[in-house]
Amino acid sequence: MLAALIPVLVLLAVLGLPLFVVLAAGALIATRADGLDPAILIIELNRISSSPNLIAIPLFTFAGVILSQGGSPQRLIRFFNAFLGWLPGGLGSVALSVCAFFTAFSGASGVTILALGGMLYPMLRQAGYGELFTCGLLTSSGSLGILFAPSLAVLVYGIVASVNIDELFLAGVLPGLILLFMLYAYSFYSGRRFHLPHHPFEWSNIWPAFRGSVLDLLLPFGIIVGIFGGFVTVGEVSACTAAYVLFLEVAVYRTIDLRRQFISLVNETAILVGSLLIILGIAMGLTNLLIDAQIPMRLLSWVESNVDDQLQFLLLLNVFLLMVGAMMDIFSAIIVVTPLILPIALHFGIDPVHLGIIILANLEIGYTTPPVGINLFIASQRFTKPVMTLFRASLPFLTIMLVWLLVVTYLPWTSLWWR
Amino acid sequence: MLARLQQILTRLETLLAGFCIVLLLGLTLGQILARNFFDTGIPAADTLSRLLLLYITFLGAALAICSDRHIKVDVIAHWIPQTWRDRLYRPLFSVGAAVCLLYTIAAVRFWRDSWEFAAEHERWQVLLDLGLPVGFGLLTMHFLCCVMCGPHRRPEITCTTC
């Protein structure tokens, strides 16, 4: 009887029931089946909040929301345009750089396309970039900076897998840069091929653009120095980032009027944090029940009997994660899938830090893949284009990202070079 | 009437969430300053941070219900017409209300046990842990309000980026 409820839950989930309700119902069914008191689920939920790194999530989210509602996007576009806009296809590279920078702070929740898409789309079109190229570029750029500090996705994986977040931030740098340079190369190639106009390089543009955005550009450096210099923890650096960004937008640039915008800022932050952490808290209870029922162990013995070596496992892992990424939001995918995959990956000798980068890279690609690649839907709303047109437009970028995924998966040193 | 009540509740929750975010920010910055400049720490800062995090989570989750912005695996939902999505709204949110109600009951029992077995000097912490049952209660109430108001009556406080 209880087992029959599982397909019903799956059906409700695909019809649009909030994921936390699906997981909560699943956990209730599991406790009932095992004859346990549902109060244990509350204990697990209470326990998760004691994770020291968890306070970084609301504070980095707050910083991201302030940045997106302030004047940071305009300042960054001006800076990257002065530095890269003179190259063939330079404006494409500008879009890629700004999106990567912005996504690292905004947490790839679709804010990048919403906040930057509206500014970059007309810029690219006026510069002579084709409609399909522009849509594809902006749609796939929405999740580009996911591996860079202080990405929320990295934080969530670190908390779920109990992996050192400092190491994850370090591991994401090279894979993130490789993807960025591969896409720069494609933009450069497109610029040459379609003879796209680009402005001449002028030193006189560089200084004002740099001066206008230097305080924004200091942010990632501050985070890296703060964490790796041993001055502050991840949780503390998130508070410094939020305070710095607030000071910048309210007192220095005056792009945010706190009296008018405070409600909107905290409402957006609370919604983003609440919708993520409630899943994390409830999934922890469910995960423990799955471990008690030896589900990961059974999965491991099945994989052991069907998969011979690490290479084969990684290939299957990529296919599985791409499917998950195409059907689930990145945060829920990390929370649900990581506890099941981690013991199997360890069995095949995969480093948990490298595994984190593989998982995030796959899910980053899933953002732009139907049926529910969130970037496709947000871009569809922003640019009023059908989802399938945007998917077609994103295909060259997706192909490049798939090649990058193979590099990141099968060359572990790209993530672990610093060891 | 119900929509008005939900709107007031939403505004209160937003203000409370804002207060918790600002307090969490201040507390964490205060800890850094206290540790680096005075070689000390703020008493019970860790417990307070944990509780504030819990409050922000529940308040944010309640606000996400009102604006229908919870994370979903909506493989089919994106592809079905709006009229059908509207028809599914009430049944789906009723399931949400039922599940949250069961969690509220479990949370009340958990809190009652914690209160009963807590030492006298730890009682203030258990009192602040009331956020758990109250949080699930809020989620249940929001789901019920949404079921009764229907899919087209959403509170006015929504994000400006969407």
Image: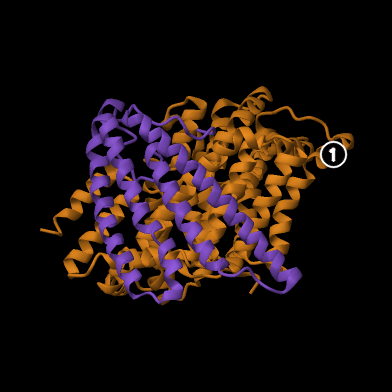
Residue A196 coordinates in the image, percent (x, y): 69, 28
Is the image coloured rainbow, by chain, by secondary structure, or in one colour? by chain
**Mark 1, residue position:** A206
Above or below, A338 against B94 in this view is below
Which is nearer the eye, A109 or A416? A109
Above or below, A196 against A36 in this view is above
The reply to whether residue A283 is in sight is yes
* Dot 1 amino acid type: Ile
Which is nearer the eye, A51 or A201? A51
Q: Residue furthest left?
A: A1
In this rendering, would B43 be left or right of A13? right
- Crowd class of label 1 (few under 14; some 14 to 19; many from 20; radius 10 Å): some
Q: Residue furthest top?
A: A126
Residue B55 coordinates in the image, percent (x, y): 46, 54
The quarter of the image holding the N terminus of chain A is: bottom left
Q: Colour of chain B?
A: purple
Q: Residue furthest right?
A: A204
The quarter of the displayed image where residue A133 is located: top right
Give the residue at x 47% y 72%.
A350
Q: Colour of chain A?
A: orange
- Label 1: chain? A
Above or below, A129 against A187 in this view is above
Which is nearer the eye, A411 or A6? A6
Q: How many marks?
A: 1
Give the residue at x 48% y 61%.
B51
Give the residue at x 58% y 48%.
A62
The quarter of the displayed image where residue A48 is located: bottom left
Give the residue at x 29% y 55%.
B104
In this rendering, would B38 be left or right of A242? right
Element at label 1 = helix
In this rendering, would A77 be left or right of A37? right
